[in-house]
Every structure is written in C-alpha cells, then in structure tokens.
Image (tube, rainbow, N blue to C red):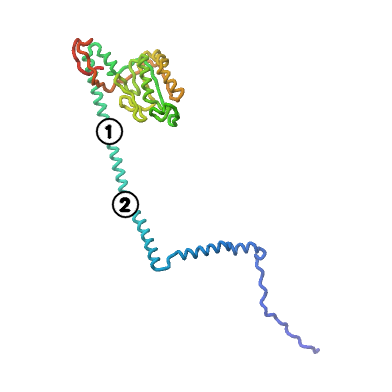
Amino acid sequence: MCGMPQQPPVRSTAPPSPRPRLDASMSLLTNVMDHSLDEGYAEAAARHGTEGRRGLPRTLRGKLVLAAGLVLAAGIVTIGADEARISAPKLAKDREKLIDRIESGNSNADDLQKSLDRLRKEVGDRQRQALEEHGGDKGELLALLSGATEVKGPGVKLVVNDAKEADQGGGGPRESTGFSDTGRVRDRDLQRVVNGLWESGAEAVSINGQRLTALSAIRAAGDAILVDNKPLVPPYTVLAVGDGRRLSTTFQDSADGQYLHVLHENYGIRTSISAADEVRLPAAPSLIVRTAEPIAGGPGKGGTDTGKGTS
C-alpha cells in the first residue's frame, strides 16, 4: 500500500522546567533567614565600620605615632609588672622583720612583767616582815588592816557584768561621762559598789583578785577600768570579808545597793550577790607609803620611831 511518508517526531530543544524548591511553601521563614539583619541596622553597622576605618591614621607619621604609643603603654605595663615582682619579696621580708620585732617586744614585755611581779612580791614580803617586827602584838592585825597579808573568812560574793546588749549602745545621760555604751559597767559604778561594801561592814575587799587598800584607786582609761593601774575585764567579781548574811542585806538596803539595782533595771547591767561561808583574798601587791609616818611614842611602840612603812 502506498501512502505518504511519515515525518519523524520533532523533539523540543527547550530546557526542562526547574524543579520547585522544597521550601517554596515557607516563604516567610526563608525571607527571615536570608535577611536576618534589618536594613537600618545593616546601614548603621556599615557606617560605623567606615567611620572606624576613617579614625585610623592613614599617613605614615600617624601610624608611627600610634605604634609608639602602643609600645610606650606596653613598656609601662611591663615595668610596673617587673617592679611589683621585685618589690613583693622585699615587702614580705619587711613584714617578717616587723613580725619578729613584735614577737621580740612581746617576749621582752613578758620578761619585764615577770621581773616586776617578782620584785613586788619581794617588796611585799619585806613589808610584811617589817610589820611583824615593829608592830608588836598588833603586827598581825596591822598587816590585816593594811592589806599586807592574805585573808580568809565568811563574806559575800558580788558579780557585776555588762549588759547583754552592751555593744549596741543606747542613749541616755550615762553617755555624757565617758563610755559611749550605756550598758557598760564604769569605774564610778565599781567605786560606789566598793564604798558601799566598806560602809556596810566589809573588813577586806578585792576585785578580780586585786586587793584593795586605803591607797587603791579605781579609774578609767578609755574603755578599760583600772584598779591600781591594772586593767580588769568583765565580769567584775567583788569579794568582801565580813558577816556574810548581814553584809549582803545591809549593802542591798544601802544607797549604793539601790544604785546598783537601778543600773540593772534601767540599763540591763547584770548583778548577783550571795553570802559565802568562806572567801579568800590575796595580799595587796605593794604598800608604798610616801607621806604618812608613825608618831614617835605612839601607842604600842614604846616611843620607838619605826619610820615609813605603815598605813
């Protein structure tokens, strides 16, 4: 069968259409990821970078000046570090020397204190011996009254201590006479306590082991209380020899006992008093009489002048 020849199929030469993007449906997220920096911020950052580059020196002289400044700063830092490294051992050595001097001074002070205590004991022993030799049959009583010998017997124990809130201060008229803390025990408080005990019939009194005599002084030095120039710390334990119960009652009923009660009620100062069957008081550290002299021919001496040494 004859027919018309068939033409071969014509192939298209156009490129195939591109495949669609997988994230085509997430156009908003794609835009955010591609343009993460806002145009205004991008412009400001570009301008800042340009100005920063403009601020750098472009000439050779400017670059040299900048380099010299950096070298100078580095040199200063290096020198400072070297000086600190060099001075550190010197400071440590000076500190060790100072510590050695302090320890040596404390050791010397301790030795001097021991020597002073030994000399005081020697002087006290000689004074007591002189009292016994020249006091006749009243030498023992004289030594007792002058505080030159240890004593024991019934009496009272009175403890006076700062208030618990003493470190907080408080206001009131007590601030105007020395201590800024109204809850602190003062020298005048102990003076009134001791005088009240003497007036109530005490025969011998001591504070924190410090025997009181007719020449004793209770005073303040800053915030410390001194008894015969010896600093004491609270609580203050006052021992008094006498008829314990009667002495305790008489003192508490006296004006000085009421004064101590007011300190407890108004300022919180802690106090306690109790009668004791036996209390022991040490001898006074030294008895130095510079003015008083016995009368020649006085009672109990038969006219013999013993010179200084009695009180």
- In the displayed structure, would residue 42 be above or below residue 183? below
Q: Residues within 10 Å of mark 2 (few under 14, many from 20)?
A: few
User: At which x and y percent is residue 197?
Assistant: 37, 17
Q: At x 26% / y 29%, what residue is drawn? A: 114
| Residue positioned 29% across, 35% down in the render | 106
Can you name the residue that lies furthest to the right here? Answer: 1
Provide residue 251's location: percent of width, then percent of height.
Answer: 40, 16
Q: Nearer the viewer, residue 180 or 147?
A: 180
Is residue 96 placed above or below 188 in the rendered structure? below
Residue 165 image point, x, y percent: 45, 29
The mark that comes first in sequence, 1 or 2, is: 2
In screen coordinates, is 91 left or right of 8? left
Q: How many numbered badges does the structure rendering display?
A: 2
Residue hosting label 1: 109
| Numbered disc 2: secondary structure | helix
Label 1 neighbour load within 10 Å: few <14, some 14-19, many 20+: few
Q: Which mark is residue 86?
A: 2
Question: Is residue 3 toward the left or the right of residue 99 in the image?
Answer: right
Residue 245, numbered label:
none
Report, in whole angstroms, how far the alpha carbon at label 1 lies from the one at label 2: 36 Å
- What's the residue type where badge 1 is placed? Ala
- Tell me if residue 300 comes above or below residue 69 in the rendering: above
Residue positioned 35% across, 54% down in the render:
80
| Residue beneath the point at 34% across and 21% down | 206
- What's the amino acid at mark 2? Ile
Mark 1: secondary structure: helix
Image quarter where the C terminus lies is top left
Coordinates of residue 247 in the picture (x, y in percent): 39, 14
